[in-house]
Amino acid sequence: MNKIEELRKMIDESNNIVFFGGAGVSTESGIPDFRSDDGLYNQHNKYNYPPEYLLSRTCFNRDIDEFYRFYKDKMNCLKYKPNITHKYLKELEDKNKLTCVITQNIDGLHQKAGSKKVYELHGTVYKNHCTKCNKEYNAEYVFNSDGVPTCSCGGVIKPDVVLYEEALPEEAFIASQKAIYNADMLIVAGTSLTVFPASSLINIFQGKYLVIINRDKTPYDNKANLVFNESLSSVIEKIKS
């Protein structure tokens, strides 16, 4: 039995699958990741600061113009569409195989594909709130505004995205912990599993099958039943063929 057949068998035998995904899930929709050679961390020559600072709470508080110059330029994912992975996960959900999706992405592509239960560990660009009155604004308003987006009350609008120096949303993190703990199969894909505390979620898994799909090796490969060091779309295409 080859690895794809093994993976199919694991999916067939499981009825409480959780999918935990990172940037590699969205790169095949055209959204750049952070750490690869052509990722965001290697495209910052035109900015005055490194991306880690530009996407920090300190930058938002102290250099709001620089923050939004980078954010609007690099975080605008409104034009992108779900790829084969997002759509396949929706199919698994429709078959009552997949319990939920846990994502480190902020692009909303799982919801665009129709997934109903998505836990967004790093927030989303699709919700934005005034720091003064808490009025909510959509992503189009923020990305299409001139300069720093402001509320009708005069307050500055902040994206509901987890910045450096900020904690993960407690509700999503606790729900993710419970989902992984109760899962009989955990598929981890498109993430290096190096960003804490999201990476620590893997240690909670008590189920039967752990599968990791990532181009590069991860610190958890030795714990997995199956490891695929190739593109996520190629694995999904083989499963579906």
Image (cartoon, rainbow, N blue to C red):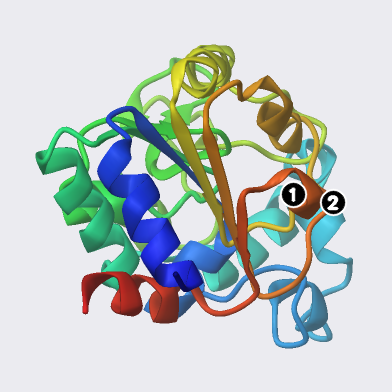
Q: Are marks 1 and 2 in contact (CB under 8 Å)?
A: yes
Q: Against 181, is 230 above or below?
A: below
The CA distance from mark 1 to mark 2 is 7 Å
Residue to which mark 2 is pinned: 219
Residue 127 placement: quadrant: top left
Q: Residue at x 63, y 70 (%)?
A: 33
Q: Residue at x 77, y 37 (%)?
A: 57
Near-viewer residue (169 or 54): 169
Numbered disc 2: secondary structure: loop
Is 236 on the left-hand or right-hand side of 41? Answer: left
Near-viewer residue (134 or 162): 162
Q: Position of residue 97 (x, y in %)?
A: 23, 36
Amino acid type at mark 1: Leu
Q: Earlier in the sequence, mark 1 or mark 2?
A: 1
Residue to which mark 1 is pinned: 193
Q: Quadrant of the N terminus?
A: bottom left
Amino acid type at mark 2: Pro
Residue 223 placement: quadrant: top right
Numbered disc 1: secondary structure: loop
Q: Position of residue 7 (x, y in %)?
A: 42, 58
Q: Position of residue 64 (x, y in %)?
A: 71, 48
